[in-house]
Amino acid sequence: MDTDPALHPAPESHEPEWLAIVRSKVRDLRYGVVQLVVHDGRVTQIERTERTRIEPPRAEAQLR
């Protein structure tokens, strides 16, 4: 059972549960993709792919 509050919004919230999940997945994502799968007009699956970017060395560091 999930106890993550982002998965179960407060009762006074009028946003759908899937939207709260998307918000939580995007909130701490630096580089990546959040993908929604829709079936018969309803969000049935949410996928998150996160990428780790490695910065190339600076040109001045390469000269040494």
Image: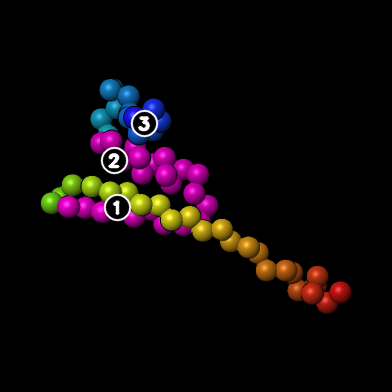
Q: Is residue 17 left or right of residue 31?
A: left
In front of the other: label 2 or label 3?
3
N-terminal-most mark, 2 or 3? 3
Q: Is residue 16 above or below residue 57?
A: above
Q: Residue at x 23, y 47 (%)?
A: 44
Query: What's the CA distance linking mark 3 and mark 1?
Result: 20 Å
Q: Position of residue 53 (x, y in %)?
A: 58, 61
Q: Residue at x 46, y 43 (%)?
A: 27
Q: Which residue is mark 3?
A: 2
Q: Quadrant of residue 61?
A: bottom right
Q: Which residues are magenta?
A: 16-39
Q: Which residue is mark 1?
A: 36
Task: Please state which amino acid type lies under the numbered disc 2.
Answer: Trp
Q: Quadrant of residue 8?
A: top left
Q: Which residue is mark 2?
A: 18
Task: Please state which amino acid type lies under the numbered disc 1.
Answer: Leu
C-beta proximity under 8 Å, tags 2 and 3: no
Q: Residue at x 17, y 52 (%)?
A: 39
